Amino acid sequence: SNNLSIKGKGIAPSITLEINAKAKSMRDSGLDVLDFGVGEPDFITPENIRNEAIEAINKGLTKYTPASGILELKKAICKKFKNDNNLLYNPSNIIVSNGAKHSIYNALMAIINPGDEVIIGVPYWVSYPELVRLTDGVPIYIYTREENNFKFSVDDLERVKTKKTKAIILNSPNNPTGAVYNEEELKGIADWAINNNVFVISDEIYEKLIYDDAKHISIASFNDNIKKISIIINGMSKAYAMTGWRIGYTAADDEIIKVMSNIQSHTTSNPNSISQYASVEALEGNQDSIEYMRKHFEHRRNTLYNGINEIGGLSCKLPEGSFYIMVNFSDLAGKTFQGMKINNSVDFANLLLEYANVAVVPGEAFGIDRYVRFSYATSIENIEKGIKRIKTTIEG
Ligand code: PLP
């Protein structure tokens, strides 16, 4: 209708949610749908964290907290940055928000003026362009290529920069590609950002999910100049299987954090008090569960990677992080399977859903169309079963 907000109406519906809804209705009708669409660990939140939350409830730690988060948690986050990333922050450099998505939104709210440009690599995490638009910024895309492991370079940045360039969003390890930027690549990007006075919003939410010899390095850790213009986003969701608890956090220059805190204080107030106390335990308690989950993800990644590459017409590269693989189906485009012509990634995802009962996310959701995204946050049994069904659907 005409009297609704132009900005609100301009926000795209989530393709991910549409496929999920279709998969759910198939499941409800009794079909065994294998879900490779999920964006969350399938593990339960570790016991020590759950217990701490129960204790917080029983102690009555159920009231408002400071809007930007409790000091104990900010201190635990500072310790994490020091130990894991060699980054020295004070509590005044930290704000805790309702999940990393909320952290990114507040960060953009704090730095974007109408028309400011934010550089985003394609394929991108679905929410980046919409968050930029919601905050009156303009997304500027760099189309990366599989041959370059879906990473952008300083040359790419140089090509798209304008006077209005305000920030880059960097996401390593990456959703949806699993790409991990190495030290040399990050140093190049850092120098470019310093020379061009462009903020780097570095989404490091998949930091702990990293495989083989890959190493996570925070871009802010090279020197004080890059640290000053870096906005580091992280959170509890992926590392600690805490997606439903809604705790994300940001580390940045204290002026940025002050603006973000003011915005947050009038919009959402503090993140859930119980989740904050549980997050202190997550960060300071025993960390063995992280390695336990990481090892499982690594084994699943290998199984999925090998299985996909054995199916005629499909291929993928071995990703170094997160829990996703982009699968290239371009050799099948234009062909017909089970009476369905494959023109684009939505067609291919529909073929897999309807004939293999395998749910994946079409690349279109991430801005590229000859790929679908598989999540391996599912069991080895499901991965093996899914591979067999896809093979039968495609190879007959
Ligand atoms: N950033 C990326 C790249 C993600 O994939 C996700 C979740 O899917 C998030 C941020 C948001 O995480 P949270 O659950 O903390 O909001």
Image (tube, rainbow, N blue to C red):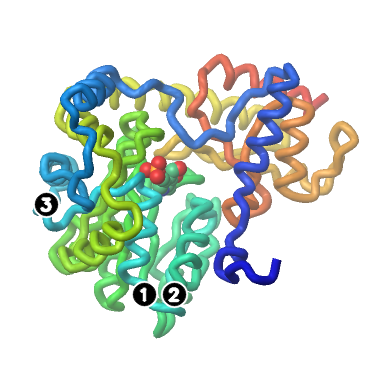
Could you say which disc has been placed on residue 166 in the image?
1
Q: Is residue 301 visible?
A: yes
Name the residue that disc number 3 marks. 91
For label 3, the SS is: helix
Please report whichever mark, 1 or 2, sits nearer to the chain's N-terminal start. 2
Question: At which x and y percent is residue 212?
Answer: 35, 32
- Amino acid type for the residue under numbered disc 1: Lys
Which three-letter amino acid code belongs to the residue tagged 2? Glu
Q: Residues within 10 Å of mark 1 (few under 14, many from 20)?
A: many
Percent from the top left, x then y, of residue 152?
44, 61
Q: Which of marks 1 and 3 is nearer the N terminus?
A: 3
Marks 3 and 2, how far apart at CA: 30 Å
322 shown above or below 379: below
Q: Which of 272 and 377 is in front in this view?
A: 272
Distance in Å between CA atoms under marks 1 and 2 = 5 Å
- Give the side of residue 27 with respect to residue 54, left or right: right
Furthest residue toward top: 381
Residue 173 is situated, as x and y percent measured from the top left of the image, at 38, 45
Q: Who's the residue at 46% across and 45% down the image? A: 175
Task: Report the quarter where the C terminus lies.
Answer: top right
Circle 2 Cα neighbour tier, 10 Å, few/some/many (<14 / 14–19 / ≥20): many
- Residue drawn 57% across the image and 42% down it: 326
Q: Which residue lies furthest to the bottom in this view?
A: 163
